[in-house]
Amino acid sequence: MQNSYKGTKSVEKIGVIGLGYVGLPLAMAFSKEIKTIGYDSDKEKIKVYMASEEFKNSNLEFTWDENRLKEANVIIVAVPTPINGENIPDLNLVKEASIVAGRNLTRNTVVVYESTVYPGVTEDICIPILERESKLIVGKDFKVGYSPERINPGDKTNVLGNIVKIVSGIDDETIEYISSLYELIIEAGTHTEYLSYQSFKDYNQVLNYVKNLKKGSIITIKMDGVLEEDEYSKPPEPAKPAIDKQSTVPKDNIVIELTPKERLINMVDWLLRALEETEHKSVLVEDLEFYDNGDLNKEVNKEQTKTNTTKKVKKTLWFKKQQSKEPIKESIKGITKEELDEFRKNNNGKKSKEYSTIYTTEKSLSYTFYGVSNIEVLNKVLDNLDILEVKGTFYITKKDLIDMPDTIKRIAEKGHEIGISLKESEDKDFYSTLETILFVQREVNKLTDQTPALVRYPYYLELNDEILEAISSGNCTVLWDNISISSSKVGKDGTLKDVMNNAFGESNISVHRGYVIYYRMDYYNDINIIPDSMLKIVKDRIDTIAYSDEIPDNGSSYSIRPAGDIMKGHKVYNYPLKDEEILHIVKDKIHSGYLLNYGESDKFDLIKNKYIGNPFIGTPNTLPGFTEEELKDVDKTGVFTDDKVLFLTFDDWATDKAINQLLYVLDKHDIKASFFIRTNYIDNNPNILRGIAEAGHDVGSHTNNHLPFAIAEDTQEEDDTKSIYYSPGEEELLERKKDLLVSYNKLQYIIGDIYMDNRPALNTILRPPTLAMSRSGMEAILDMGFSHIVSGDFSTRDYEDKKPEALVYKIVNGMVTDNGNPMNIQNGSILVLHMSDFKGNPFYDPNLTAKALDMAIPILKSKGYSFARLSDYLK
């Protein structure tokens, strides 16, 4: 490693990430000296460059394949850092570029950041990302440097080659290496002289330094760490600890020793005062375009100088506000290691749980926010929450609390919840994480009487045990999100339409109970995206869940509440359930071997008693495996009672919109029904399944992957009678038995503890996929422990209907099947319905099946029918 960074001869290839107004000229310049790879994630941009005659027959290769960066000895990050409403750089693109660089980082590579960032970003944010993604160690396996871009878009005079390049690195070797590299393309040369908190001991030293500056000098301030010997030409004598005058000297005349950061602030204050006293005009390096090259004596108007000085103070002294908060600063010092150790001991090694969904059956969800420093967006967000008359959860960082206590207090006074946002660059281990949590909790409590208990990072991270232990020690819980409205897939310039299309689609047309929606207020360039999306989600994806009828405020609507309030509600539950929570009569009831000692005749007798079929499925072609004689004894009526009762059964799975509306209509008419769940998607939304069970309905399996127990050459609709079916083979039966086990286990770990009306909500009745069945299929199902196989006599095919009136007509007046057979409800009819969100049914419209039942049920009741669950009859 020691010889790897000497000179530029070892550089075989350079990779440049980001091909905008900075990255492209840089890549072009280096390609004249060294083979260069220009990478950008924008495929269309890359295609344009590839087709350009300008770049043909050159050493510059363009790609959108990030893996090509593995070929580079040097990776230069040149992505933009747009400024947000608080004049602070948005670092998301830099972070994303760091992830790409880290994923493709090889040993002995140097990563150089050209992006303009504030002090500490490279070390505190970028390097940890590089190490995490590459599994390599900075300083040992790779090096990192910084050389801020100084190109002004549209300036054809002051271009890359004739602007002095400032370079820095993690050590002398890296600085020397990067400097020699850039000198290949920078005619004006590079600059590596520094000032630091060590440079001066009093104002007179600073004044003498400034008086001796040459016109056009560049002053570079090292924000952290001591100066090495070669970082300045003639270093002043090391400064002794500074002594504050009068106000900071205690009565007993004990000398107060300032921290390096405090000494640095003093030094910069002296420097600005000395520049003003000597009538120097000062500008930021990125503002040098105001001067003509070679004519640095040219005057700049006083207003411009004032503006540049203001910008200098804002950017160079960005942390000074933080230093001025003495009460909060003292609070940080008040948290000792002994105190942190005591919290750790009391926690006894427990790890915080991590949630994305709040596991509750309450008809509520939460809006959560980050980025309160973007005041313009925050104000719009708060206004819209007032318009909606709802409360949200706002995650704040320690810096937010230090810089903006009045804003935090204002948010809390509006009734919103305060949570804690940790930072990857600062909260790296148990002690730093717990210190941040305790600090924020105590200061927020002083401001608002709240004690924050929810924690997250601005973006998703895999948290190690040490971090989770710290969060638990602070009596906190990690809450991520179901949907992040701010997405790199959309990009910072995305439109509201882009945002909504990315967040919602055919598979999630509505929000869920317990949903967590996350808004980053500091992400989009358009300040209206976040506040507008809040309103649009309510209009399109929340209000549409409710069922609209003649009853005002009928209780079917979903509310938006602070996440912490929902998590404290009485509707929360463990997911998955613990083994000891599952009812004994439910636990592990499904497994192979129930028919182990059954003979063939015994198996057939069981089938005759346990299979409830369908009137149109009863021939060797549609019910394979039986002889003609046996088929006479197999049920083909699809009913099992003559009582004037109807059984409403619902198959498959759906979003909250469909299921919530069905549950409302059933409750409105005081009806209990049977739901058969296809379980391969329920992990994404266990809450609504538990809502079905808590409402008192039967829940049974409709398998996991919807594998039929009789096989046709083509995929068939339900109760198909035209195709020829075959019995599954041994491997296919084994696959289906495993599928049944998976399905039941999923159900029992969500609702296995619910016991209502003297029975468990979860039963062992199976609804076969597509109603297709065979003898071997029935034996496999019964061998797994299912009590009944139920098809039914009235398959409504509600998925074919476009209007609820058409379904109502079929239910009330009957229908004709594909084969021309009439089908009508009768005493004991089992109606096969679906809870699906039917394609083509606009999400503003009510669920078709729910609406049809709301109209049909009163008519059926007027005809003398009652309604029951299958478990009311099948024991």
Image (cartoon, rainbow, N blue to C red):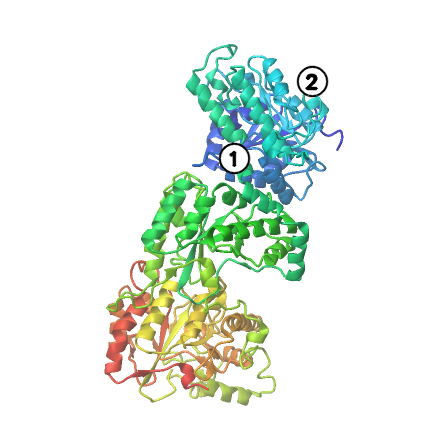
Residue 154 position by quadrant:
top left
Residue at image x 48%, y 15%? 291
Q: Is residue 169 visible?
A: yes
Q: Is residue 349 visible?
A: no
Q: Please, what is the three-letter code of the amino acid marked with disc 2?
A: Lys
> What is the x, y in percent for residue 564?
47, 59
Q: Is residue 276 left or right of residue 558?
A: right
Q: Is residue 447 left or right of residue 111?
A: left
Q: Nearer the viewer, residue 644 or 719?
A: 644
> What is the x, y in percent for residue 430?
65, 51
How busy is the neighbourhood of tag 2: few (under 14 within 10 Å), some, or many (20 plus)? few
Q: Report the residue that reaches farthest toward the right.
A: 2
> What is the x, y in percent for residue 153?
46, 24
Q: Is residue 493 left or right of residue 281?
A: left
Residue with the mark numbered 1 = 40
Q: Please, what is the three-letter code of the amino acid marked with disc 1?
A: Asp
Q: Secondary structure at mark 1?
A: loop
Q: Which mark is residue 234?
A: 2
Q: Secondary structure at mark 2?
A: loop
Q: Nearer the viewer, residue 287 or 764?
A: 287
Gap in angstroms between the C-alphas marked 1 and 2: 43 Å
